[in-house]
C-alpha cells in the first residue's frame, strides 16, 4: 500500500482532509512511514482523531491529536522502534517504553551533515540550525514542551563521544535489559 493511499485512507476515516495532515506534518516525514507501518501490520487498522468536524477544516490541534494517537497505537502494539520527532513524548514514560535521545553538539552534527551531503560547512550549519529550530517548534506545538531536557528520556547518548557502533550496542543492551539502565542507590 502506498504512503499517499494510507495517509488518505486514515485521514478520511478520521474525517480530516489528507492535505491538512500532510501540511501539519510536512517537516515530519515520519508520519507517512508510520502510517505505512500501521497498514502493513494490520491492513484494517486506521487511527482516528478524537474529534470529528463537519466539513470544516479541522484545527491544528485535531490534526496533532491524530498524529499523536497514531504514534501511541504503534507503541501499544509492542516491539516497535519509533524514530520520530518527539515520539517519546507521545508514548510517555513507563515500564514498556525505552525513551532514547541521540544527540551531539551542533558543530559535530553540522560537520557530519556536510560530509554526508557534500555541503559546505556554512550550508550544513544553516541546515542544522533550521532543523534544531523546527524541533523546538514541533515540541512546543505538539506537546507544549518549552525546553527539551535530558530528564525527558531514559537514556541520552552523546555521539560526540561514542561511535555509532557503541551507541547501537548501548541501545540494544538497554532494550534487551531495561533494568541495566537503573543505577543502584
Image: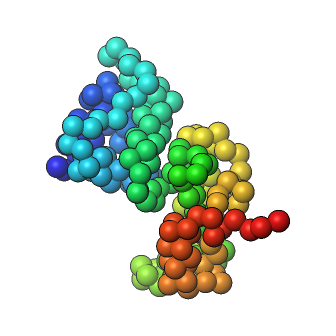
Position of residue 156 measured from the top left corner of the image (x, y, whole percent): 65, 67
- Identify the residue at image location x=55%, y=40%: 142
Q: Position of residue 109 (x, y in %)?
A: 57, 76
- For residue 94, side relative to residue 79 (left or right): right
Query: Residue most toward the right?
Result: 185
In the image, taking residue 56 as reference, residue 128 lies left or right, namely: right
The residue shown at (82%, 65%) is: 185
Q: In which quarter of the image is residue 11?
A: top left
Nearer the observer, 173 or 104: 173
Q: How many labels does the image show?
A: 0
Residue depicted at x 58% and y 64%: 178
For this orientation, the residue located farthest to the top is 54
Residue 163, by quadrant, is bottom right
Looking at the picture, does residue 18 appear above or below residue 154?
above
Q: Where is residue 51 in the image (x, y as percent from the top left)?
A: 43, 21
User: Is any part of residue 27 visible from this angle?
Assistant: yes
Compared to residue 153, the image places residue 21 above or below, namely: above
Horizontal side of 60 relative to 32 (left or right) equals: right
The percent coordinates of residue 33 (x first, y second) are: 32, 54
User: Is any atom of residue 122 visible in this view?
Assistant: no
Relative height, residue 18 to residue 105 (above, below)? above
Q: Answer above or below: position of 141 versus 166.
A: above
Q: Which colour scheme is used?
A: rainbow
Query: Quick one: 57 or 158, which is closer to the camera?
Result: 158
Nearer the observer, 136 or 114? 136
Amino acid at each position: 500500500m502506498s504512503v499517499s493511499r494510507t495517509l488518505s485512507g486514515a485521514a478520511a476515516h478520521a474525517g480530516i482532509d489528507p492535505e491538512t495532515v500532510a501540511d501539519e506534518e510536512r517537516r515530519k516525514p515520519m508520519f507517512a512511514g508510520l502510517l505505512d507501518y500501521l497498514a502493513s501490520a494490520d491492513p484494517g487498522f486506521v487511527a482516528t482523531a478524537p474529534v470529528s468536524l463537519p466539513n470544516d477544516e479541522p484545527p491544528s490541534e485535531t490534526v496533532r491529536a491524530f498524529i499523536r494517537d497514531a504514534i501511541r497505537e504503534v507503541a501499544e502494539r509492542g516491539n516497535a522502534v519509533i524514530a520520530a520527532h518527539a515520539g517519546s513524548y507521545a508514548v510517555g514514560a513507563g515500564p514498556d517504553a525505552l525513551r532514547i535521545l541521540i544527540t551531539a553538539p551542533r558543530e559535530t552534527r553540522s560537520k557530519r551533515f556536510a560530509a554526508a551531503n557534500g555541503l559546505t560547512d556554512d550550508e550544513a550549519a544553516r541546515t542544522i540550525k533550521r532543523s534544531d529550530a523546527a524541533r523546538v517548534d514541533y515540541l512546543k506545538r505538539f506537546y507544549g514542551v518549552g525546553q527539551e531536557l535530558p530528564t525527558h528520556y531514559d537514556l541520552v547518548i552523546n555521539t560526540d563521544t561514542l561511535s555509532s557502533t557503541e551507541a547501537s550496542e548501548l541501545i540494544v543492551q538497554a532494550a534487551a535489559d531495561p533494568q541495566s539502565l537503573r543505577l543502584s542507590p
